[in-house]
Amino acid sequence: MTLYQPFLDHAISYMKSHLDLAPYPIPEGFESKSAVVGKGKHQETVITTSYAFQTPKLRQIRAAHVQGGKALQVLNFVIFPQLNYELPFFGADLVTLPGGHLIALDMQPLFRDDLAYQAKYTEPILPMFHAHQEHLTWGGDFPEEAQPFFSPAFLWTRPQETSVVETRVFAAFQDYLQAYLNFVEQAEAVSNSKTLQSIEDAQLRYLRYRAEKDPARGMFKRFYGEEWTEEYIHGFLFDLERKISSVS
């Protein structure tokens, strides 16, 4: 059992019980990929497995799970709403490297500076955020250019102990996912053309930023090569731009 497998198992099981999940197409060659890294007794097999679903309200629910022994465990789990809903994104980056654990959980807003949007999607989850933050202290500075893409309920922490990840972080992950699916359940489709355009613009802004700055790019290139990596990032992880251009 790897560190983040219980997170993934919980997410899939919880979503299946609360959503009408359908498979989301994973391009060929991306369902699973492995590479042997290191030499001698330090040799490890790194396996990256992809999962993807969709629902009438959620365009793409996807996970990339990287398992490379004790010193490398990653789960990147993101939910992108359909373009006719003003829902935030759900984002969980759970990373374990030789230097420790890096944990980021958020419902990333489409319109961070819109007070009505904040009142609808951030204020209701602030008590939950503060309750978890008592046990999961702030992880320190993160890039200024990234700040517009995170909400005031951004849970960013670097726990020292693996046991904290298995308990406190897991509890926070469960709570954030449950709160997000509550928002999804209440969400109503948008029909105003101006709002629809601003939703698309905001989603593309976020995806372009994430694709350009993907912190896993270097790791994937090292394991699987540049061509596979760029196609994985643009053709699966952050595929909206391609989906829109293929429709138009």
Image (cartoon, grey):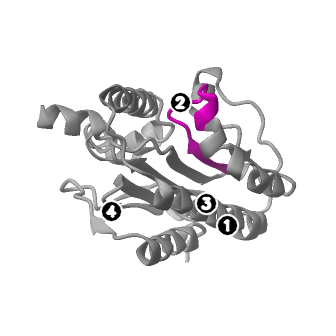
- Specify the amino acid type for callout 1: Phe
Find the distance from the CA under tag 1 to the CA under tag 4.
Answer: 22 Å
**Residue extending furthest toward the right:** 134
Closer to the chain start, of discs 3 and 1, is 1
- Specify the amino acid type for callout 2: Phe
Q: Which residues are magenta?
A: 102-117
Q: Is residue 215 above or below residue 146?
A: below
x, y percent for residue 42: 55, 60
- Residue 150 visible in the snapshot: no
- Residue 18 visible in the snapshot: yes
- Specify the amino acid type for callout 3: Ala
Left or right of 170, for residue 216: left
- Quarter occupied by residue 138: top right
Find the distance from the CA under tag 3 to the CA under tag 2.
Answer: 19 Å
Find the distance from the CA under tag 2 to the CA under tag 1.
Answer: 28 Å
Residue annotated with mark 1: 170
- At mark 2, the secondary structure is loop
Residue annotated with mark 2: 111
Residue annotated with mark 3: 179
Closer to the chain start, of discs 3 and 4, is 4
